[in-house]
Image (tube, grey):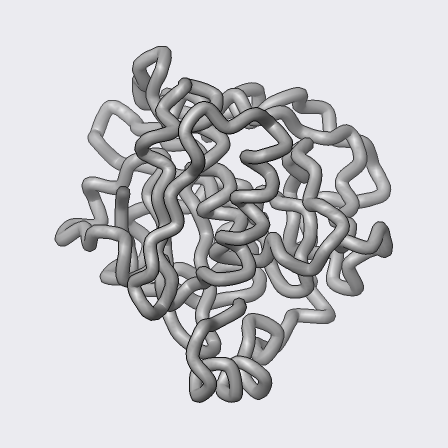
Amino acid sequence: MRHTTASIFIAALFFNCNTITEKKNIDNEIVNVNTENAYKSVAEIPAPKGFERKYATENSFGNWLRKLPLKKDRHVHLYDGSLKPYQQAQFAVIDMPVGKSDLQQCADAVMRLRAEYLYATHQLDKIVFRDNDKTVYQCPANADRVAFDKYLNKVFAACGSYSLNQQLKAKSNFTEISIGDVLIKGGFPGHAVIVVDLAENKNGEKVYMLAQSYMPAQDIHLLQNFSNPSLSPWYSVKESSIIQTPQWIFYTNQLKTW
């Protein structure tokens, strides 16, 4: 979480995603990270019994997120190649390079996934982010991969959960959750996770899957659900107004969209 004004920078020195207490001892650990992940993509992870995935059009953000490839290795690595000390949070790890600098943290991962989708679908004019001072960061027109990566690093260095929270649009009803929506607490500390899949049963009940990065910069990973281990890695829309993820607590009124 990097910020552009002196006061915000000072605050960030004392408060960041790592100030949230991590669960070091979890009785209901669902996935042993030392075993291989059997699923090649998000879409291959089975929906809970009685649920079917919501339809997503071919070129949509939701369909793109479902196709995200997963690593066989379940371990989350930091940007320097070392293992993240806390290895209980993830169900699986998205196969996407984190980079070699401490840049792709929580909100950065959300912006990364959105930007990668727009880049892959040749919508570079829609890749726009703003920092805390409302400075606009527009992806260069016709950017090649090198230029695109440089642009992303500039965004990661300047923007964070506070600025992204200001940029996203609030959703008034949590039951209208969609793939690509973001649960976000903007601030110091702040955090953001993204909805990467959604399923529904015949009664209209919905479940969703979440992905995050964290601090320091690390692999983007799918989150386990320790509040309902039998449902993990899915979360139920109807369970509570509180969404307890392994490293952060969100509320249903913190759901936003692009």
Does residue 97 sit above or below 49 in this rendering?
below
- Is 110 displayed left or right of 183 in the figure? right
Foreground residue among 239 and 145: 145
Q: Quadrant of residue 74?
A: top right
Position of the C terminus, as image quadrant, is: top left
144 or 21, nearer to the observer: 144
Left or right: residue 195 versus residue 229 is left
Q: Residue furthest left?
A: 172
Q: Which residue corresponds to the image point at 42% horizontal and 63% vertical from the top-left?
A: 161
Residue 229 visible, this angle: no
**Which quadrant of the view contains residue 203?**
top left
**Residue located at (69% from left, 53% from top):** 218
Q: Position of residue 256 (x, y in %)?
A: 27, 51
Seen as rendered, the residue at the extreme top is 58
Q: Residue at x 72, y 70 (%)?
A: 24
State the count of labels.
0
Q: Is residue 79 visible?
A: yes
Location of residue 180 in the rendering, given as x and y in whole percent from the top left corner = 36, 37
Q: Which residue occupies the foreground of this view, 186 or 157? A: 157
| Residue 159: % across, % down | 45, 60
Q: Is residue 137 above or below residue 21?
A: above
Relative to residue 254, is residue 246 drawn left or right? right
Tell which of 40 and 17 is nearer to you. Answer: 17
Which quarter of the figure has residue 251? bottom left
Tell whether 92 sits left or right of 171.
right
Name the residue: 49% across, 38% down: 113
Residue 95 place in picture, x, y as percent: 68, 32
